[in-house]
Image (cartoon, grey):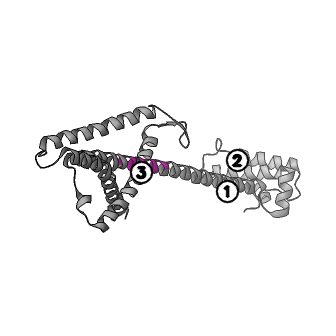
Amino acid sequence: MSDLYRTLGVSRNASANEIKSAYRRLARRYHPDLNSADSAAREFARITEAYQTLIDPQKRAYYDRTGTNLSSSSSRHAASAAARVRAARRAHDKARIDRIVNELLEREREATRSRGLVVFTVIPLFLSTLIAAWLKPKIFEDANLYWRLAMIAMFLVGVWHLGRNLKRLLDQYTYRPVLISLMRYNKPAEPHPRSFVCAVFGGVYLLALGLGMLIGSLTEDHSKSGLGSSGENLFFSVLFYPPIVVLIVDIVYLINQRFDEW
């Protein structure tokens, strides 16, 4: 850093009046309005900085003690602090954007899982009920003991799995999230009564059951089977096989999801 006293052309013991006089003299020589030279503006800035430091007793004492311009040091510190604040603000904004993007992605993944529940739970349930009512398969009756035990185990797991999935579907589709900010959600409102959704679900199930029974009655050879055994087999089929079908389809769906994530 240049010597501020030499910049103004005064001694280190110069009084305030001498400093003012030196500054006025140099300002008349280098002021940009009076001097059009390219170096005049830079020289005027130098003498102005020197004058502002030496005319202030506190800044002059600090300069005499350290040889450093207090205003320049403060400016550097202020600029450094401002840079740190800007960096912190950019980091905060980036983290906020990352959180929003992650939430959007998680919401999209949740919506995909919900659609998967509909496709791979409800539709297999209705179709398997229709087919079971239509064909009244005798897979269980024709199987040996070990396969029967395995099918009973699959049925029990399938009932539990089906009940869990249906509960998740009710929780998802009988409530609608209400957006109150970019980051938080209010308690979901209920656009449709749960009883209404259950009634629609039950109606579609009964429709699938009735359609399967109708097709089965039209295609069944009554001369080869008794009505009593047919009715018992129908009741067993529509209760036993659909949970197993839903379980198998959902397992295949989950395996496919894992392969997609890899």
Is the N terminus in the top left, top right, bottom left or bottom right quadrant? Answer: bottom right
Magenta-highlighted residues = 103-115
- Please state which of residues 9 and 236 is positioned toward the viewer in this rendering: 236
Left or right placement of residue 227 versus residue 72 in this view: left
Confirm whether residue 122 shows in the render. yes
User: What crowding class fits label 3: few (fewer than 14 Cα within 10 Å), some (14-19), or many (20 or more)?
Assistant: few
Tell me where residue 135 appears, x and y as whole percent: 19, 49
- Please state which of residues 46 and 31 is positioned toward the viewer in this rendering: 46
Q: Is residue 72 rendered magenta in the image?
A: no
Q: Main secondary structure of the magenta part?
A: helix
- Please state which of residues 85 and 21 is positioned toward the viewer in this rendering: 85
Q: Is residue 215 above or below residue 158?
A: above
Of circles 3 and 2, which is in front? 3
Of circles 1 and 3, which is in front? 3
Which residue in the structure is indicated by mark 1?
80
Q: Residue at x 22, y 53 (%)?
A: 137
